[in-house]
Amino acid sequence: MEVALDLTPALSGLTGVARYTLRLAAELPYAGITVNGFGIGRGPGTLPAGSRHLPIPLRIVQSAWRHVGIPRAEWIAGGGDLVHSVDLVLPPTRRPLVATVHDVAALDRPDLHPPAQVAQMRARLEALDAATLILAVSQTTADALGRHGIDLGRVVVTPLAATPVSRTPARPQTRPPYLLAVGELTARKDYPTLLRALAQEPARELRLVMAGPRGYRAQEVADVATAVGVADRIEMLGRVSDAEVAALYRGATALCLTSVIEGFGLPLVEAMAFGLPIVASDIAVTHEVAGDAAIYAPVGDAEAFAAALHRVVTDDELRSTLKRNAARRSQQFSWTRTAELTAAAYRKAASCD
């Protein structure tokens, strides 16, 4: 089977969606799928060898899609029995269409997202009527789609996995011991709760390294750090390479994830791949992904997070248990499995057409 795979997110750089897209393109051939990759627009990222690139601004192409329904995805890709869209805007096609949904967080918590992102997600959800099958990256995301009126009979869960580690390790950017937070500095990550936890008595001696680009309401992170008196104990590294983030995972004491809402939580599987203990928000998706590799605290509860962080840092037995659980649980997630589940979904979609 030939699949026209939209690789456009890869042009944006090292985002979670870009990682997902590139790993699928690399693994699907081993699952019996011929990938006709294509990317639209311009950006700092690169497409895999052999992909077709339409270097026209994406907004212009998307406008043409909305108004005249061309160019169709299979034209851009150079053919395909099926089209797979992994980004927000579904391309026009006369082939069966599979669409990946990473989350619907902007609709469930519009207060934590810019209005434009909320509007984009609403349009995406409405456009899913055109998809033969929908891939959800977690059962939590699948359940959310169901709450928003999507027929769950059209949804297939295809979990994500950890980014492969670079064979050329980067030099550590900071010295242990430190806690680590990985991800965009954006409102839904609720980093202010993490910073307030660091200011609480049990966690007052801990340092925090934050790796990720600035996002929606990112300035609040620096403002809260100053307000609660922990700015001198935080390193904000901004966007880092895969090799650099791997070095950070290797040196960290624990991963901290204080998100209010997530579609999957790639840092969870990445941390588990390094056998790293996790302190996470007590939400459905963190339990689905991290299970017994994490200890949990209620969303927004700085005192509970402070106590959890203190336990992980000071309790050697707990930390050893979490490490063992993380190493074992990480084996459940692989890009090979993701590709196999995706290939099976392609074949189902083709048979439904």
Image (tube, rainbow, N blue to C red):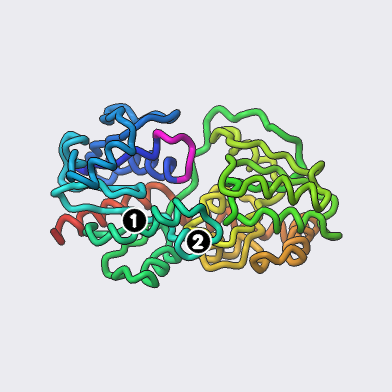
Question: Which of the pair 55/334 is nearer the observer?
Answer: 55
Q: Earlier in the sequence, mark 1 or mark 2?
A: 2
Q: Quadrant of the N terminus?
A: top left
Q: Secondary structure at mark 1?
A: helix
Please give the name of the residue rendered at 52% of the width and 32% of the height, measured from the top-left corner: 166
Please give the name of the residue rendered at 69% of the width and 48% of the height, measured from the top-left corner: 221
Q: Residues within 10 Å of mark 1 (few under 14, many from 20)?
A: some
User: Is 266 in the magenta?
Assistant: no
Q: Residues within 10 Å of mark 2 (few under 14, many from 20)?
A: some
Q: Which residue has dot 1 on it?
A: 124
Q: Quadrant of the C terminus?
A: bottom left
Q: Which residue has dot 2 on it?
A: 110
Question: Which of the pair 316/93 is nearer the observer?
Answer: 93
How far separated are the C-alphas under marks 1 and 2?
15 Å
Question: Which of the pair 204/293 is nearer the observer?
Answer: 204
Q: How far across and down, in percent of the image, does residue 225 sit? A: 76, 48
Q: Secondary structure at mark 2?
A: helix
174 displayed left or right of 261: right
Decide if residue 46 is in sight here. yes
Q: How far across and down, in percent of the image, does residue 310 sit? A: 79, 59
Check disc 2 and give the amino acid type.
Pro
What range is drawn magenta here? 11-16
Decide if residue 273 is in sight here. no
Please give the name of the residue rendered at 20% of the width and 57% of the height, measured from the top-left corner: 349
Mark number for residue 54? none
Q: How far across and down, in percent of the image, does residue 153 sit? A: 27, 69
184 displayed left or right of 47: right
Q: How far across and down, in percent of the image, does residue 280 sit? A: 63, 60
| Contact check, label 1 and label 2, Cβ < 8 Å | no
Check disc 1 and give the amino acid type.
Arg
Position above or below: 150 against 45: below
265 displayed left or right of 173: left
